[in-house]
Image: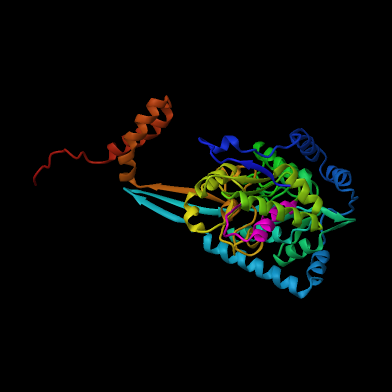
Amino acid sequence: MLKRLDLRGVSGDLRTHLPRPQIAASPTATVQAVLAAVRADGDAALRRYTEQFDGVTLDDLRVSHDELANALDSLEPPLRQALEAARDAVDEYHRHERRPDTRFEAGGMVVESLRRPVDRAGIYVPGGRAGYPSTVIMSVVPAQVAGVGEVVICVPPASGQNSDRTTLAAAALCGVTEVYRVGGAQAIGAMAYGTESIRSVDVIVGPGNVYVAVAKREVAAQGVVGVPAAFAGPSEVVVIADESTPTEWAAIDVVVQAEHGPDGLAWLVTWSSEVADEVTAAVERVVVASPRRADLEATLREGGYAVVVDGPEKAVEVANGVAPEHLQLMCAEPDRLLPLVRHAGAVFCGPWSPASIGDYVAGPSHVLPTFGSARFAGGLGTEDFVRTIHAITLDESGFASRGSTVRAIAEAEGLPAHGESIRIRSAKRDAVSPRADAETVPL
């Protein structure tokens, strides 16, 4: 079930020996067609695609206030308490991470960095295979902490006219009142372009399948909406284990992220062939017994690997090459390996730190980079909802000390107006200022 990849004795760049996830057929053309239809036909396209892809005929796109309130009221007390605890943990962490405005002063110049939230944020919450109230919390709360005034959620309908009740309850728990039962690429198009029922947003965040992730890239490339740099697609995990790692713990943690379905990654990396054998066998036992066996097998069939390397440093080199969404250092002395980690969405250190803790209650958002985008992007946070505006103020001395520099560079670039904007001010200043070398006439 986990394909064996033996990299012992391999020299040079290990990345060239690592398989990468492959999408069987590029969805770009399909996504572009869906987006174009939503842009042209609005709500009619949303209803059409919801019936085609989800098998659901919708009357109302928007979830009513009563339905949200009823979903929250229907929660069993232990689940409500758990969701409240998760919300509070995410809120506390992101308030700690929030950056203030700054002021920089140097030689007659002041630069203020003013941090301003976007006006309206769109949150995509996956559905279909499962409900994800945790994704509501992990996406909405950072936006609220950033100061976003309006938050919109799109979530696929689960059955009939309904979306997953726990997802709706989480939205109500977070104070979101604008929720639409629309999923897939069509939901991304609706939030980007706007329709008769859904007003456009400034930024779209949230994980989803490859169609959703590609749709976000497409609308961002059109310049109509902002999206984070990370490709938040199918889920991934790399577990680094050794002889000190309990076999069953390593096996279940390899399997956890595969529960989300196909196109993801589930890797074990070790420098012990015995550990590789034992964990591989344990993974098979877990999969066979799981009620989500089909989803697990779909992921592991293409993206499941047991990799054997020469030592701990090589294991981290493999992890850096994969750049996984989740990296677990479930080996002895994880603190020694952590400084070597360069590319990962989130790192979980030691046997008592499974990625499932990060999925729900650690505090940082579980919306993380996938498909190798951890090489250049990080997890969702308040920064994804904030713009920095620079306010620059110079007094006369600050202008005078910088003017000649501007004119020299502007002349080199062939931009005369840039230089002229300095020259005319310098001329005015020289005309009204006494010459420094003028003679002083005694009285």
The structure residue drawn at horizontal position 8% and vertical position 45%, both measured from the top left corner, is 442
The structure residue drawn at horizontal position 83% and vertical position 66%, both measured from the top left corner, is 66
Note whether 85 is above or below 29 in the view shown: below
**Residue 7 seen from this side:** yes
Question: What main secondary structure does the magenta stretch of the protein show?
Answer: helix
Asked if the magenta segment contains residue 256, the reply would be yes
Answer with left or right where residue 122 lies relative to residue 320.
right
Residue closer to the observer: 115 or 181: 181
Q: Which residues are magenta?
A: 239-260
Residue 208 position within the rendered picture, expressed as x and y whole percent measured from the top left: 72, 48
Note whether 414 is above or below 216 in the view shown: above
Query: Which residue is farthest front?
Result: 274
Tag count in the figure?
0
Residue 83 position within the rendered picture, expressed as x and y whole percent measured from the top left: 70, 68
The structure residue drawn at horizontal position 76% and vertical position 33%, both measured from the top left corner, is 29
Locate residue 400: give its quadrant: top left
Residue 80 position within the rendered picture, expressed as x and y whole percent measured from the top left: 74, 71
Locate residue 42: give its quadrant: top right
Locate residue 301: give its quadrant: top right
Query: Which residue is farthest top?
Result: 414
Answer with left or right where residue 192 lies relative to residue 328.
right
